[in-house]
Amino acid sequence: MFLAKVEGSVVATKKDPSMNGRKLLLLRPQLVDEKDASKFRPGANTIVAVDCLGAGRSSLASWTSWMFSGNKFSVLKRRNPLRMLPELIKRLCNVRGVSANAGASRNSIETFERQCRCHLPDEFQAFYLLCDGIGFDDFASQILPLDKVERLKCELEEFGIRRSWDYVPFTEDNTSNPVCVCCRDPLAGYIVQVFHDDSPKIKWRNLASLIGKMPAQLERDEFEFESVPADFSEPERSEADTAAARKLLADVRREGVSYVERDDGCSFAAWLFGEEQIPEIAGLFVAKSASV
């Protein structure tokens, strides 16, 4: 397997029949920088690969190739977010002014979960074991340490933050629009940005995706988490995305679900669905109109 960055998609008017229904992505191989082994540099060539998992533009992925009936195919496989975290944190901390705190203890994480009455997704537990927050010297933004996460969660709930899907806010950039991880199925692990003057928006599949896109944004003169490209602004969707969307719709259509939770759930599902689910997305608007 080799490491690559997704640079875009490829459209073919005519494909081999075995490729029908498969999405093709353009990859740029990532090589270890000879001057600094802790960084990657882009390769000179690009590769067209078959996407089996719905990776988005700018995401880091691994790919492999094999021979079949005399033809060589490259296949994209998204890397396990848990395995990617140490590497992505290291890349982020290589940006000037970015520094990570020492990791939290397992006991601290368990105490946090008891105090906040939530269960952090495995990826977030792994993150806080590696580093208890990340600061950016040149900006007001930060990925909060656990003690500040607990304090912010309590403050936001006092001011009426929507508690659907057990949001846990973990960022701060003085915009009053914290980024939160969902801790309740079917959205557990997905990342939502909660706005003080608008409805929440589902933006990233996992923490690894958010952190992987941050270095490029931090190189600009201004940085806010809202400026980091969202996974769902790209057309690719995974089977896990569509499965979560369908489960979400089944949950919010139950009796006793509040209008606010139903409205947010339908909005999230619309973002999680792909082009193949356009009829289901159209049905969402009909359902929402009927509920209004």
Image: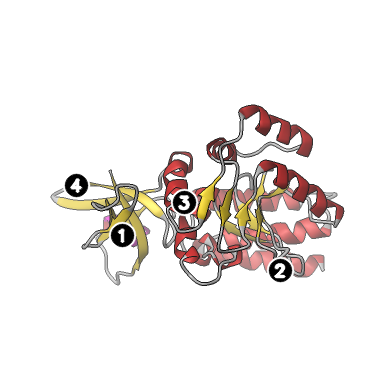
Q: Position of residue 152 (x, y in %)?
A: 76, 50
Q: Which label sits in the foreground, 4 or 3?
A: 3
Q: Is any atom of residue 52 visible in this view?
A: yes
The kind of residue tagged 1 is Leu
Tell me if residue 117 is in the magenta stretch: no
Looking at the rendering, the stretch of residues picked out in magenta corresponds to 18-28
Q: Residue 79: percent from the left, percent from the top?
A: 40, 44
**Type of residue at label 3?**
Cys
Q: Is residue 204 left or right of residue 84?
A: right
Cα separation, mark 4 vs mark 3, equals 42 Å
Q: Which amino acid does label 4 sit on?
A: Phe
Label 2 vs 4, first from the N-terminus: 4
Look at mark 2 in the image and give the residue it sits on: 286
Q: Split into 4 quadrants, where in the image is the C terminus?
A: bottom right
Three-letter code, disc 2: Val
Q: Do the residues labelled 3 and 1 touch (CB within 8 Å)?
A: no
Of badges 2 and 4, the one in the foreground is 4
**In this rendering, which labeled residue sits more in front, label 1 or label 2?**
1
Mark 1 lies on residue: 27
User: Which quadrant does the N terminus fall into?
Assistant: top left
The answer for how far apart the CA atoms under marks 1 and 2 are is 39 Å
Q: Can residue 185 be seen by looking at this rendering?
A: no
Q: Nearer the viewer, mark 3 or mark 1?
A: 3
User: How far is mark 3 from mark 1, CA to CA?
Assistant: 24 Å
